[in-house]
Image: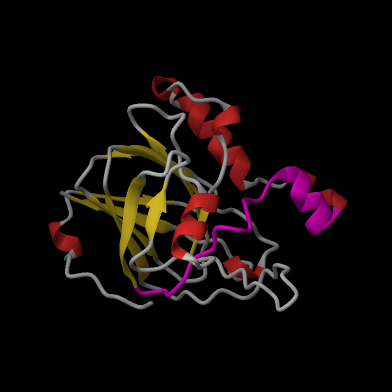
Amino acid sequence: MIKESPLQAAAARYRATVPAGDYWMQVVKAGQTLRILDREGNQAADTLFYNAADPSERYSAVDTIREQGNVYLTAGTPLLSNLGNVMLEITADTCGRHDTLGGACATESNTVRYALEKKCMHACRDSWMLAVASHPEFGMSKRDITHNINFFMNVPVTPDGGLSFADGISDAGKYVEMRAHMDVIVLISNCPQLNNPCNAYNPTPIDVLIWN
Protein backbone atom coordinates (compact mmCIF):
# COMPACT_ATOMS: atom_id res chain seq x y z
CA MET A 1 0.00 0.00 0.00
CA ILE A 2 1.41 3.35 -0.99
CA LYS A 3 1.28 5.90 1.81
CA GLU A 4 3.36 9.06 1.89
CA SER A 5 4.79 10.51 5.08
CA PRO A 6 4.03 13.96 6.47
CA LEU A 7 7.58 14.15 7.88
CA GLN A 8 10.03 16.52 6.24
CA ALA A 9 13.62 15.40 5.73
CA ALA A 10 14.92 18.81 6.81
CA ALA A 11 13.36 18.31 10.26
CA ALA A 12 15.01 14.94 10.93
CA ARG A 13 17.23 14.84 14.03
CA TYR A 14 19.59 12.37 12.35
CA ARG A 15 20.59 11.52 8.78
CA ALA A 16 23.34 9.26 7.49
CA THR A 17 24.29 7.70 4.18
CA VAL A 18 25.13 3.99 4.16
CA PRO A 19 27.23 2.95 1.14
CA ALA A 20 26.42 -0.30 -0.65
CA GLY A 21 28.17 -3.16 1.13
CA ASP A 22 28.34 -1.30 4.44
CA TYR A 23 26.26 -1.70 7.60
CA TRP A 24 24.37 0.59 9.99
CA MET A 25 23.69 -0.37 13.61
CA GLN A 26 22.09 1.94 16.17
CA VAL A 27 19.33 2.09 18.75
CA VAL A 28 16.07 3.74 17.71
CA LYS A 29 14.10 4.86 20.76
CA ALA A 30 10.43 4.15 21.40
CA GLY A 31 8.35 6.84 19.73
CA GLN A 32 11.00 7.75 17.17
CA THR A 33 10.41 7.26 13.45
CA LEU A 34 13.02 5.62 11.24
CA ARG A 35 13.07 6.15 7.48
CA ILE A 36 15.12 4.08 5.04
CA LEU A 37 15.52 5.93 1.76
CA ASP A 38 16.36 4.19 -1.50
CA ARG A 39 18.50 6.94 -3.00
CA GLU A 40 18.98 5.59 -6.52
CA GLY A 41 16.38 2.83 -6.75
CA ASN A 42 16.26 -0.98 -6.72
CA GLN A 43 18.57 -1.29 -3.73
CA ALA A 44 17.96 -3.95 -1.04
CA ALA A 45 18.32 -3.02 2.65
CA ASP A 46 18.52 -6.26 4.65
CA THR A 47 17.41 -5.33 8.16
CA LEU A 48 17.21 -6.97 11.58
CA PHE A 49 15.50 -5.66 14.74
CA TYR A 50 16.17 -6.47 18.42
CA ASN A 51 14.74 -5.33 21.72
CA ALA A 52 17.48 -3.00 23.00
CA ALA A 53 16.81 -4.09 26.60
CA ASP A 54 17.06 -7.79 25.77
CA PRO A 55 18.32 -8.73 22.27
CA SER A 56 17.02 -12.29 22.73
CA GLU A 57 13.69 -10.72 21.76
CA ARG A 58 13.92 -9.98 18.05
CA TYR A 59 11.90 -9.54 14.87
CA SER A 60 9.95 -12.62 13.85
CA ALA A 61 8.94 -13.04 10.21
CA VAL A 62 6.72 -16.00 11.15
CA ASP A 63 4.67 -14.08 13.73
CA THR A 64 4.45 -10.96 11.56
CA ILE A 65 3.17 -12.86 8.51
CA ARG A 66 0.75 -14.97 10.52
CA GLU A 67 -0.85 -12.04 12.31
CA GLN A 68 -1.33 -9.88 9.23
CA GLY A 69 -2.24 -12.76 6.89
CA ASN A 70 0.01 -11.44 4.13
CA VAL A 71 3.55 -12.39 3.14
CA TYR A 72 4.41 -8.87 1.94
CA LEU A 73 5.08 -5.98 4.32
CA THR A 74 3.86 -2.44 3.72
CA ALA A 75 2.23 0.57 5.41
CA GLY A 76 0.11 -0.57 8.34
CA THR A 77 2.17 -3.70 9.03
CA PRO A 78 3.09 -4.20 12.71
CA LEU A 79 6.50 -5.85 12.99
CA LEU A 80 6.19 -8.49 15.70
CA SER A 81 8.85 -10.04 17.88
CA ASN A 82 9.35 -13.71 18.71
CA LEU A 83 7.44 -12.92 21.94
CA GLY A 84 4.46 -11.52 20.05
CA ASN A 85 5.13 -7.88 20.92
CA VAL A 86 4.91 -5.05 18.39
CA MET A 87 8.45 -3.75 17.91
CA LEU A 88 7.73 -1.21 15.19
CA GLU A 89 4.93 -0.36 12.78
CA ILE A 90 5.36 0.62 9.15
CA THR A 91 3.71 4.02 9.02
CA ALA A 92 4.61 5.17 5.49
CA ASP A 93 5.73 3.39 2.35
CA THR A 94 6.23 4.77 -1.15
CA CYS A 95 7.54 1.48 -2.57
CA GLY A 96 4.48 -0.67 -1.88
CA ARG A 97 5.77 -3.93 -0.52
CA HIS A 98 8.84 -5.51 1.03
CA ASP A 99 10.11 -9.07 1.34
CA THR A 100 10.66 -11.01 4.54
CA LEU A 101 10.85 -14.53 3.10
CA GLY A 102 13.97 -14.48 0.91
CA GLY A 103 16.56 -14.22 3.68
CA ALA A 104 19.92 -12.57 3.13
CA CYS A 105 22.80 -13.29 0.82
CA ALA A 106 25.70 -15.29 2.23
CA THR A 107 28.90 -16.45 0.61
CA GLU A 108 27.59 -20.02 0.76
CA SER A 109 24.25 -19.23 -0.88
CA ASN A 110 26.03 -17.17 -3.53
CA THR A 111 27.86 -20.30 -4.68
CA VAL A 112 24.55 -22.19 -4.97
CA ARG A 113 22.55 -19.40 -6.54
CA TYR A 114 25.17 -17.99 -8.90
CA ALA A 115 28.49 -19.80 -9.31
CA LEU A 116 31.25 -21.42 -7.27
CA GLU A 117 33.62 -18.55 -7.96
CA LYS A 118 31.13 -16.10 -6.34
CA LYS A 119 31.97 -17.44 -2.86
CA CYS A 120 34.65 -14.82 -2.35
CA MET A 121 32.20 -11.98 -2.97
CA HIS A 122 31.01 -9.87 -0.06
CA ALA A 123 27.55 -10.73 1.32
CA CYS A 124 24.99 -9.32 3.78
CA ARG A 125 25.80 -11.90 6.43
CA ASP A 126 29.41 -10.69 6.34
CA SER A 127 28.22 -7.15 7.01
CA TRP A 128 26.03 -8.27 9.92
CA MET A 129 28.89 -10.27 11.41
CA LEU A 130 31.23 -7.30 11.11
CA ALA A 131 28.60 -5.10 12.78
CA VAL A 132 28.05 -7.31 15.82
CA ALA A 133 31.82 -7.86 16.20
CA SER A 134 32.41 -4.09 16.03
CA HIS A 135 29.71 -3.30 18.61
CA PRO A 136 30.36 -5.55 21.62
CA GLU A 137 28.24 -3.20 23.75
CA PHE A 138 25.14 -4.95 22.38
CA GLY A 139 26.36 -8.38 23.57
CA MET A 140 25.43 -10.12 20.34
CA SER A 141 27.12 -12.79 18.23
CA LYS A 142 26.48 -14.71 15.03
CA ARG A 143 23.85 -16.85 16.75
CA ASP A 144 21.70 -13.71 16.99
CA ILE A 145 21.49 -13.37 13.20
CA THR A 146 17.94 -14.56 12.47
CA HIS A 147 14.88 -13.37 10.55
CA ASN A 148 15.29 -10.23 8.48
CA ILE A 149 13.33 -7.90 6.24
CA ASN A 150 14.58 -7.11 2.76
CA PHE A 151 13.32 -3.59 2.32
CA PHE A 152 12.77 -2.63 -1.34
CA MET A 153 13.47 -6.20 -2.47
CA ASN A 154 11.04 -7.88 -4.87
CA VAL A 155 10.58 -11.60 -4.15
CA PRO A 156 7.24 -12.69 -5.63
CA VAL A 157 5.61 -15.90 -4.42
CA THR A 158 4.86 -18.10 -7.41
CA PRO A 159 1.48 -19.85 -7.91
CA ASP A 160 3.02 -23.14 -6.77
CA GLY A 161 4.37 -21.59 -3.57
CA GLY A 162 7.97 -21.00 -4.61
CA LEU A 163 9.99 -17.80 -4.48
CA SER A 164 11.40 -15.89 -7.42
CA PHE A 165 13.96 -13.10 -7.18
CA ALA A 166 12.60 -10.56 -9.64
CA ASP A 167 13.49 -7.10 -10.86
CA GLY A 168 13.04 -4.49 -8.17
CA ILE A 169 9.89 -2.37 -7.95
CA SER A 170 11.48 0.48 -6.03
CA ASP A 171 12.84 3.64 -7.60
CA ALA A 172 15.06 6.58 -6.75
CA GLY A 173 13.67 8.46 -3.75
CA LYS A 174 11.31 5.71 -2.56
CA TYR A 175 11.26 5.17 1.19
CA VAL A 176 9.77 3.17 4.03
CA GLU A 177 9.14 4.54 7.52
CA MET A 178 8.63 2.77 10.83
CA ARG A 179 7.62 4.09 14.24
CA ALA A 180 9.30 2.26 17.11
CA HIS A 181 7.04 0.86 19.85
CA MET A 182 10.02 -0.05 22.02
CA ASP A 183 13.73 0.81 22.09
CA VAL A 184 15.10 -1.29 19.22
CA ILE A 185 18.55 -2.10 17.92
CA VAL A 186 18.38 -1.70 14.15
CA LEU A 187 20.99 -3.56 12.09
CA ILE A 188 21.02 -2.90 8.36
CA SER A 189 23.20 -4.49 5.73
CA ASN A 190 23.02 -2.36 2.62
CA CYS A 191 23.29 -5.25 0.23
CA PRO A 192 26.47 -5.57 -1.87
CA GLN A 193 24.99 -8.24 -4.14
CA LEU A 194 25.99 -7.70 -7.78
CA ASN A 195 24.31 -10.82 -9.13
CA ASN A 196 20.69 -10.30 -8.04
CA PRO A 197 18.17 -8.41 -10.23
CA CYS A 198 16.60 -7.01 -7.03
CA ASN A 199 19.64 -4.70 -6.87
CA ALA A 200 19.47 -4.03 -10.61
CA TYR A 201 23.01 -5.54 -10.66
CA ASN A 202 24.20 -2.21 -9.29
CA PRO A 203 24.31 -1.84 -5.49
CA THR A 204 23.83 1.79 -4.43
CA PRO A 205 23.76 3.84 -1.19
CA ILE A 206 20.76 4.28 1.09
CA ASP A 207 20.01 7.03 3.59
CA VAL A 208 18.79 6.51 7.15
CA LEU A 209 16.79 9.31 8.83
CA ILE A 210 15.33 9.53 12.34
CA TRP A 211 12.68 11.86 13.77
CA ASN A 212 11.78 12.25 17.44
Place of residue 183 in the rendered image (x, y in percent of width and height, measured from the top left) = 28, 37
Compared across the picture, whether 144 is left or right of 193 comes to left
Residue at the extreme right of the image, as rendered: 116
Q: Residue at x 49, y 25 (%)?
A: 140
Height in image: 138 above or below 73? above
* Residue 102 seen anywhere in this rendered image of the structure: yes
Q: Image check: 106 left or right of 111?
A: left
Percent x, y for residue 157? 65, 72
Number of numbered callouts drawn: 0
Q: Residue at x 61, y 41 (%)?
A: 125
Q: Closest to the observer: 50 or 197?
A: 50
- Residue 156, how many percent across, how many down? 62, 73
Residue 110 located left or right of residue 117: left
Residue in the picture at 80% in, 59% down: 114
**Is 188 left or right of 183, judged from the image as shown?**
right
Quadrant that contains the N terminus: bottom left
| Residue drawn at the location 54% of the way across and 38% of the way down | 128
Q: Which residues are magenta?
A: 94-115
- Residue 41 within the magenta-colored segment of the rendering: no
Q: Is residue 190 visible?
A: no
In magenta segment, residue 111: yes
